Image: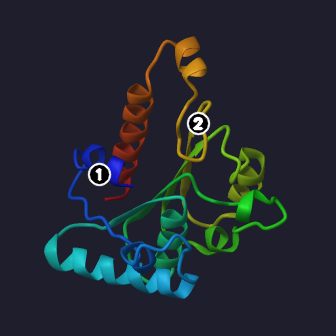
Amino acid sequence: MRRWKDRLSTIGDVVTLDYPYLQQGQRRPDPLPRLIAAHREALAEARRIHTGPAILIGKSMGGRVGCHVALEAAVAGIVCLGYPLCGGGDPAKLRDKVLRSLATPILLVQGTRDSLCALDLLENVRMEMKAPHLLHVVEGGDHSLMVTKRQLTAAGETQDEVERRIVEAIAQFVARVS
């Protein structure tokens, strides 16, 4: 998420957070309730520092945790960069309940090569979501939204241009929900 901070700062104030397990130098994520509590604390701190509508933006697990936080805290919107729909990449382990439960507007930014979120599975979930939602597809993007050099060359573009389009989609979403 840190690599996105500068880009997202062009849209508005950005406050980042490191979950406790990362602060402690661990590789294994904390249990979901602890992640949600840390995210909720960071949101409360951000609201003390900044005014205006809050948009939760997270990469992978951070986006999923942000969705859980939005179930209990009023935020203007959520942006998920590479939502991890399939636990461990296993389509039988869908993490879709929170998406189906949301009422908060959400933008999902997904790559076509994301092994943790096949677009056909996501489409099935989207058909049952109650929240207003948009999907921005990154052609050739993996779970980190990185496009292969071969595909970039074939398309005549750079990763920087791909990421600028992602930020434009986020800016349009933020303008719509703020």
Residue 148's tag is none
In the image, taking residue 69 as reference, residue 17 lies left or right, namely left
Label 1: which secondary element: helix
Task: State the SS at label 2.
Answer: loop
For the image, the number of numbered tags is: 2
The amino acid type of the residue labelled 1 equals Lys
Q: Which residue is under mark 2? A: 141
Residue at (69, 52) in percent of width and height: 117
Residue at image coords 22%, 44%: 10
Which of the 4 quarters of the picture holds residue 24? Answer: bottom left
Mark 1 and mark 2 lie on one chain; the one further toward the N terminus is: 1
Instruction: Tell me which residue sits at (46%, 17%) in the image.
Output: 157
Tell me which amino acid carries mark 2: Gly
Q: Mark 1 = which residue?
A: 5
Q: Position of residue 39 (x, y in %)?
A: 40, 78
Where does the image place residue 121, in percent across and percent down from the top left? 77, 53
